[in-house]
Amino acid sequence: MSELRPIQKFRHRHLLGIEGLSEQDILTLLDRAEDAIEVSRQVEKKRATLRGRTLINLFFEASTRTQSSFELAGKRLGADVMNMSVATSSIKKGETLIDTAVTLNAMRPDIIVVRHAQAGAVHLLAKKVDCAVVNAGDGAHEHPTQALLDALTIRRNKGRIQGLTVAICGDILHSRVARSNILLLSTLGARVRAVGPSTLMPAGIERMGAQACRDMKSGLAGADIVMMLRLQRERMNSGFVPSSREYFRTFGLDAEKLRYADKDALIMHPGPMNRGVEIDSSIADGPQSLIREQVEMGVAVRMAVLAALAEHLPNE
Amino acid sequence: MKAPSSPSIAHQPLALVNARLLDPAGGKEMRGGVLVVDGIIRDLGPGVAPANLPSHAHAVDCRGDVVAPGLIDMCAFVGEPGAEHRETIATATAAAAAGGVTTILARPDTNPPVDEPAVVDFLLRRARDTGQVRVLPVAALSKGLRGEEIAEIGLLKEAGAVAFSDAANSLRNAQIMRRVMAYARDFDALVIHHTQDPDFATEGVMNEGEFSTRLGLPGIPREAEAIMLDRDIRLVALTGARYHAALVSTRLSLEAVRAAKKAGLPITCATSINHLTLNENDIGDYRTFLKLSPPLRQEEERQALVAALAQGLIDVIVSDHNPQDVETKRLPFAEAEYGAIGLETMLSAGLRLVHSGEVKLARLLAAMSSRPAEILGLPQGKLAIGAPADLIRFDPDEPYVLDPMKLHSRCKNTPFDEAKLQGRVKLTLVAGQVVWGE
């Protein structure tokens, strides 16, 4: 077995977001990822799917987890991987985004994986390059591979996504993970709830496909999946919530609040966690937690995405 | 081109004949011609025809096109002094002439700002020497546009400022705003205020709602505008100042203005051509040319603005001309500058509302000429014997596709890039002199 099995062709040149993907597009990627899990669990983890291809990881925002996940995914498929971490402090904002895009494009990469602190920055970059572009998170907009890995994790543990109740809890307003997950899970037929204080709840979230809940009791009632979001420390200082202790008391996931959910509910978190702020350690490390499995699924989903996009790359 | 504000030299009388004369001030329309002598409308009506013109007059056959007063744009950024890389009076007035705008009110947020009589004087001189249309300075309400101390309203007015505004800066402090208004009232000065609560606006970059949530961009609620406008209306009632809301974009603001007018307060308001013809969905895939202040709103808000224009509740349409170069626009949406150019496309874009049957042509033209003239106390903006011959000729139906590279502004940040438009200005006269066409 030298390559990942092509299942169904992915129809898009870039992966910029979940928005615009059909149910079939999503299922195609999830099915491919299942194969990639098998590859990653063997001693010989290397495949030739991307042999000769160049993958650039362009991270304008620091991220250990996502960057290393994409790096491993690329390497397991045989690509040459280059990591570029652009320290946000040293760049003159924006100018470098387009300049960097043009410069990198001249190096003829096949795929660029981009993370940027500004919503829409990855779209802007995608317009300036000839290669495939993967959004690894842009501002509060989207983080499509995170939503795909979450869906894969859910599907493997619950056997389905259709009909499940998924509670996404915390800072919905600033979360690209929440947006991509709401779009993806509702496309696959899950009932999605957005749970958090009104100050962290974006306008019109219902029209995106999520039911808004302002407390954990109603938000978690009967939930099959409880997905906790990271609360950035700077949100505390800018008046969205008064303190971390009040936040933990009201929205932090502990054993008591978990009882509102279904007895077989599973816990997820995109990481990195703030233990004691949004999630209690005993829950994060407990038997219902899928948090470590999510990391494994991350590599598999990214392998699937890279392989799918590579099919559109010219072969000459 | 010649400077129109120079003392009128005796030149050949000019007659625009065979035209559809539209006087928005009186809402009158008739067939006929206009005779221009020494920069003044000497005669008009069916009697001005090729058969009975003075023998030395130059006659232009308008072939049934509309002839109307030149447009008066109450809000445009002309780049001088200090931002000549974005625009100059020469390029702004060239764009204006091509768009049928014969009078521009220049925004005071220049560098240095227009808070010194010397800067007013500079602008008037530059306009005389390099401008093709009339440029009237708007001076600052507060020193340095900082919202802390009252600007020298008396001296600035004496120097030639026609109105007072802090441009896109909203005066945050109600006590200072009260003093500014009270002081302005003593000089019968017009206060123009951009009503967007700055605390909301520092965080948001587009209209707040489903669309901002989808794009992951911080939003500005409609209330940000209404809160500031409500406060200002109370201060107008308290001080009696003549007040003009620079740019309203929401139904909440329209209701506030409606109530204030009903109560007899000296309040008028404007909206921009962009807010009348575009909505937040036009931002699409993070198009920064559509990043405006106040932000483009939902379609229902746009429709309400159009209805308010048709009713006359909205007095004025501005271009809100704001040239931005590529470097400040080719950025991620949140980092890009606000603003779009509009002097040259204001009329064509506005005619969309006429073609869709939502607004009558006379009403559209009134909001771009006679109402601004009335608010500012200018002699322009009407087709009347003795009025200045600031005139435009256009065929409202002529179709064209906008090529941004052909626009006269130094910057090309138009939201109507490649748009199909109708109605192009064929001839623009300022004080009887041709500044565009023929």
Image (cartoon, coloured by chain):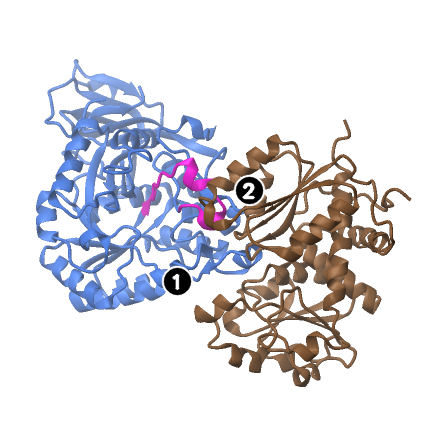
Chain colours: A brown, B blue
User: In the rendering, at what x and y percent does residue B35 appear?
Assistant: 20, 25
Judge by depth and name the residue closer to the eye, A296 or B254.
A296
Real-space Cα distance between discs 1 and 2? 26 Å
The answer to whether residue B360 is left or right of residue B51 is right
Tell me if residue B413 can be seen.
no
Judge by depth and name the residue closer to the eye, B45 or B98.
B98
Q: Say which amino acid is labelled 1.
A: Phe
The answer to whether residue A37 is left or right of residue A92 is right
* Range of magenta residues: B317-337
Disc 1 marks which residue? B200
Residue at the spot x=32%, y=23% of the render?
B62
Quadrant holding the N terminus of chain B: top left
Considering every residue shown, the one lying at the far top of the view is: B55
Disc 2 marks which residue? A124
How crowded pointer 2 is (Cα within 10 Å; few <14, some 14-19, many 20+) is rated as: many
Contact between marks 1 and 2 (CB within 8 A): the answer is: no
Q: Is disc 2 placed on a helix, strand or loop?
A: helix
